[in-house]
Amino acid sequence: EDIASVEPVYLFFVYVYKHMGTRLSFLYGLTNELAFRCAVMSNGIKKYSRILKNPKVPTHRKVSLVHIYLFTKGCFQCSTWPDLSVSQAKRFHSCVIGIYRNAIGQNFSKIGQPELMLNDIELIQQFNLTSPLNIIRKARLGLFARILTKKPPSLLPFMMACSKHKDG
């Protein structure tokens, strides 16, 4: 065929692409998705405010509820995220820690005295919380395990090499 008679093909460029609930951006990286996820988490956890604010509900139950929420809806598909930049990791960390603090009652508006507030590490240790970046790591390991159970042909050599190494 003569190249002049071929219909032109257009390739449309989008700045943000949404795939199965996750926003991907060539230009902005994970920034848009992270902003969206933090908004979803902050607003979504408000549904449970009656439980979280109830002084009769034990703290370990509140922590369990928050963990369930974060590992399901709050951090949906975070297993597919690329590595976070320093600023993105800080944003995700502060969002999750804010949710933890509100659930446990460890925020300034409830305590009123900064010297009584726990720092983030103390908060995570004292209440047996999952650190924000470990939420992403757990999700990635879970995704990897689900992939391995499917035994994809391209990963079989890798799986065999790992099992031989494990056995010695």
Image (tube, grey):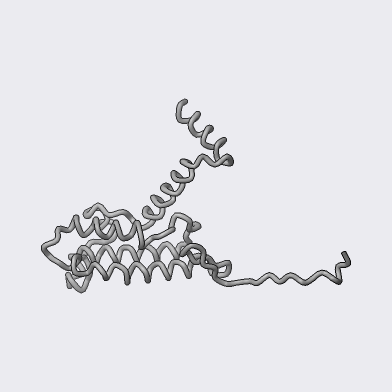
Q: Nearer the viewer, residue 96 or 67?
A: 67
Is residue 131 shown above or below 29?
A: above
What is the count of numbered marks? 0
Name the residue at 25% across, 59% down: 65
Task: Give the residue at the far top of this rendering.
Answer: 168
Left or right, 109 with respect to 158, comes to left
Give coordinates of residue 68: x percent, y percent: 29, 57
Quadrant of the rendered image containing residue 88: bottom left
Give coordinates of residue 53: x percent, y percent: 17, 68
Name the residue at 48% across, 31% down: 163
Give coordinates of residue 33: x percent, y percent: 46, 67
Q: Nearer the viewer, residue 79 or 28?
A: 79
Task: Give the residue at the far right of this rendering.
Answer: 2
Name the residue at 23% across, 57% down: 63
Q: Nearer the viewer, residue 16 or 136?
A: 16
Name the residue at 23% across, 61% down: 118
Quadrant of the rendered image containing residue 75: bottom left
Is residue 68 shown above or below 7?
A: above
Assign the N terminus to one quadrant of the image.
bottom right
Is residue 145 shown above or below 86?
A: above
Give coordinates of residue 44: x percent, y percent: 31, 69
